[in-house]
Amino acid sequence: MRTRLIFIALLGTALLPAAASAECKNFSSSEVRKAVIKKTIMVGMAPGDVKRSWGDPTKIRSAHPGGDEWEYWNPAGDQIVSFGSDGCVIGWRTARD
């Protein structure tokens, strides 16, 4: 009986990191596919979905207060994608030099 309790406790601990990413919106595969085709992103997207739509960022600012920022170079103005502490998109903006 004691062995079973330890196994359950370890299993519960292993699931905690996955729960942290559960804050991202659970878009359907067709919603993500449409965004990728249109080269758009949406609030609540996971980092992998952003990469599928916009590709790898030009620059990453890690540990920005509240979460990371990804920068995408663009001649009309760099696109800055902000991620919350849960790792999901909370917004984006254009930065012009």
Image: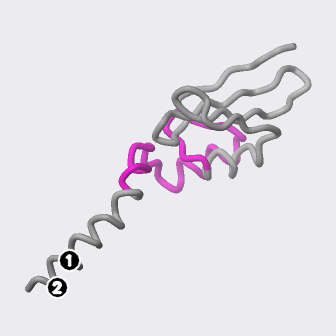
Given the current orientation, which residue lies at the most extreme right position?
A: 75
Is residue 27 covered in magenta?
yes
Neighbours of disc 2 within 10 Å: few (<14), some (14-19), many (20+): few
Q: Label 1 to label 2, Cα distance in Å? A: 5 Å
Given the current orientation, which residue lies at the most extreme top position?
A: 97
Location of residue 78 by image quarter: top right
Is residue 54 covered in magenta?
no
Between residue 7 and residue 57, name the one nearer to us: 7
Neighbours of disc 1 within 10 Å: few (<14), some (14-19), many (20+): few
Between residue 59 and residue 42, name the one nearer to us: 59
Between residue 63 and residue 92, name the one nearer to us: 63
User: Would you name the residue on which mark 1 appears?
Assistant: 6
Between residue 23 and residue 53, name the one nearer to us: 23
Question: Which element carries disc 2, helix, strand or loop?
Answer: helix
Whether pointer 1 and pointer 2 mark residues with C-beta atoms closer than 8 Å, the reply is yes
Q: Is residue 10 left or right of residue 57?
A: left
Task: Tell me the residue at 21%/74% (across/down).
Answer: 8
Question: Residue 16 placed where, x, y %?
Answer: 34, 58
Task: Tell me the residue at 85%/32% (across/down).
Answer: 73
Mark seen at residue 3: 2
Task: Tell me the residue at 55%/33% (across/down).
Answer: 67
Task: Tell me the residue at 61%/52% (across/down).
Answer: 48
Q: Is residue 71 left or right of residue 27?
A: right
Question: Residue 35 placed where, x, y %?
Answer: 63, 43
Looking at the figure, which quarter contains the N terminus?
A: bottom left
Type of amino acid at the residue the image marks with label 1: Ile
Magenta-tinted stretch = 19-47
